Image (cartoon, grey):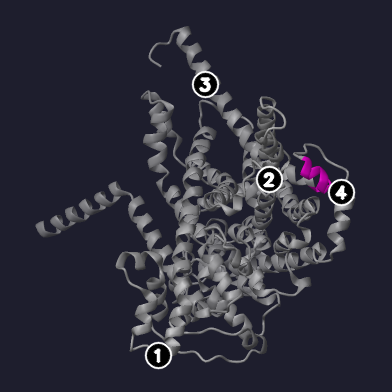
Amino acid sequence: MGRKTVDGYANYTAGILAKKTLIHIVCIFLAILSIAPFYLMVVNATSSSLQIRMGLNYFFGSSLAANYKVLMDQSFFNFYDGFISSFIIAASATFLSCYFSTLAAYSIIVYDYKLRKAAYAFILGVMMIPSMVSSAGFVDMVYKWNMYDTYWPLIIPAIAAPAVVFFMKQYMEGALPLEIVEASRIDGCSEFGTFNRIALPIMKPAIATQAIFGFITNWNQLFMPSMILSSMEKKTMPMLVEILKSNRYKTEYGTVYLGLTITIIPMFVVYIFLSRYIIAGVALGSLKE
Amino acid sequence: MAGAGSNKTIKRGRGKVNYSRYGYFFILPFFLVYFTFTFYPLMTTIYYSMTDYTRTLTQVATNEPTEINFVGTFNFKALFQGSTWYQEATGFNFKDNVQSDPNLTNTEKTAFYRNMNLGKETFEAFGNTMIMWLLNFIPQILLSLLLAAWFTDTRAKVRGQGFYKFMLYLPNIITAASISMLFLSIFGYPQGPINIALHKSFAANAQAELATLVPGTEEYQQLLMQINNETSGTVIFFDKTWWARGIISFINFWMWYGNTMIVLIAGILGISPSLYEAAQIDGANASQTFRRITLPLLRPILLYTLVTSLIGGMQMYDIPKIIAGSASSLLLARPKIVTVVVLISDLLGASKNYAIASAISVMLFVFTAMFSLILFYIMRDKDAAKLKKEEKAYKKALGKGM
């Protein structure tokens, strides 16, 4: 921007305008790319197999009821049970991981004991271990301890979530003044009571963020549930997808799309209501180091 | 950049000695569960990798204990020697060698044969995983960087960022299993939308060509037959290795670039605005600012993205699993999209071969750890390291002078 002539300025603004236009074109294209497969899915879920075979459909058809009937006739795709299973696992695991991780973080922040630093170093150290690495020993243990085909091995381990402890600790450092803890002690509150009544409410924003992500991650899990759950009524929502792939629905295209739509709806709803917190949480999570 | 206001120091240890036991109480659940459900299985996994531990389905069903023999590094040796590259590189013939080895018992020979194909499969799985991770990560980081630079451009001031972030992040939330099945249907053969479109365009071209031919000739009849055949012009996408890999990588890319973009935007917004102002005053243009200020200062965040993506990518499971199918369809020869964890899940689920599944897990662990360390080394702040070294030397010299 050497010369400040009117011409130069016009060039400059024109350049910015061109760049802006390019950015919007690319972003709109990407936005369409994000939604197009889902749109296609919903359209096909309402179309008959014949319509799908004839070619691309752009608008909703009228075969939703017929597709639903085929889906339910087979009784293999029991999405109601799938929803309940997924919900039980995801909600319990999320609750446990949030509560006990906050408790562990509280222990590290508030108390001074010999092994405090070692405990924290350990939590940091194990955070990076890929979770799949211990799966062979874990599955074997599940069989040996008679926990196969129960929800317990999918819920209990959530109590020990190193990454969540780390996040809670980082947040608590800035949010929980130790004076409050001391004041609570003077007022005669027990240590456990102080945690429940003083620390937990202060930690609400961090807990909310972790709860959203914990719930989504647990809900979408496929590996461990398919290793551990076998009975039909315990299958989780993502496990039902494999049923859609089976030969039963080979020529029922509309039905497969409808089944997929049903498995996707819960997370869609979660996202529509909580997207602001989710996107803020992603940004926050990256800055935690 | 730690969480909210971590620069605020907190005095510790004001609690009297008798409070410290609460510290232990409160952290106890974490350690109890961690050691029972993660650390203990991790140790047994490492132990099983050095045994011949496999179970039959009846043993599993009746919970009957299985005899476990310690075999040392036997499994790893078998996996390495069974790999294609090892046999090609050394000209080592696995079968003959094992057959003629007098030191091996018959049981060991059987075990060797059993693991022989697994060696080939294991290294193939590592290769597939790596290729599919790279195919998705490279375009992902490039697009995310570009979008992050655009969204934080103070001159262009892009509007509607909230909407774009909402849309671009959307696929990340949706169940990966469902998304894989959706893409499997979209690219389905012969009646997925893509193949129908391919057939239609083939048919349209063929119709045009048909008009130039004389009706009744053999050529004409053949073309007519092709037009009526719904499979002509179509591609069996998931039977072709590179198509299948490409589609899986695309799904991963499509699910994750929005996430990476948001992380990078947060990182760029964390860079002090005064640096950008100074650059602007000095007459730097957008690309210079990006290369000289944004990229160097973004290094920690880039490293974080790279390492978390690597750890996640090496454990890729849902998408290839849904697309490749279960082990029972192994007979149909899956395309080369079986990842390490898909292979582990087959060994744990169908064949109950805990020994080899554990050995592969240990290899996955070592591989991921080594790769991460290499990344840390490459991405380390060279200037800062140099400065630290000089400072140390300076202090040392000072010490000697005194």
Crowding near the residue tagged with mark 3, few <14, some 14–19, many ≥20 C-alpha atoms within 10 Å: some
Instruction: Tell me the number on the disc at residue B231.
Output: 2
User: Of tags 3 and 1, which is closer to the observer?
Assistant: 1
Where residue B198 sits: x, y (%)? Answer: 66, 39
The answer to whether A273 is drawn above or below residue B103 in the figure is: above
Q: Which chain does the residue under circle 2 lie in?
A: B
Do discs 2 and 4 belong to a common subunit?
no
- Is B322 included in the stretch rendered in magenta? no
- Residue at figure coordinates x 62%, y 88% from the top left: B59
Tell me if residue A188 can be seen. Answer: no
Do discs 1 and 2 belong to a common subunit?
yes
Q: Which chain does the residue under circle 3 lie in?
A: A
Tag 3 residue: A16
- Return the residue nearer the eye: A109 or B338: B338
Q: Amino acid at mark 2?
A: Thr
Tag 1 residue: B105
Quote the CA–CA distance across marks 3 and 4: 48 Å
Give the left or right position of residue B353, taking residue B57 as reference.
left
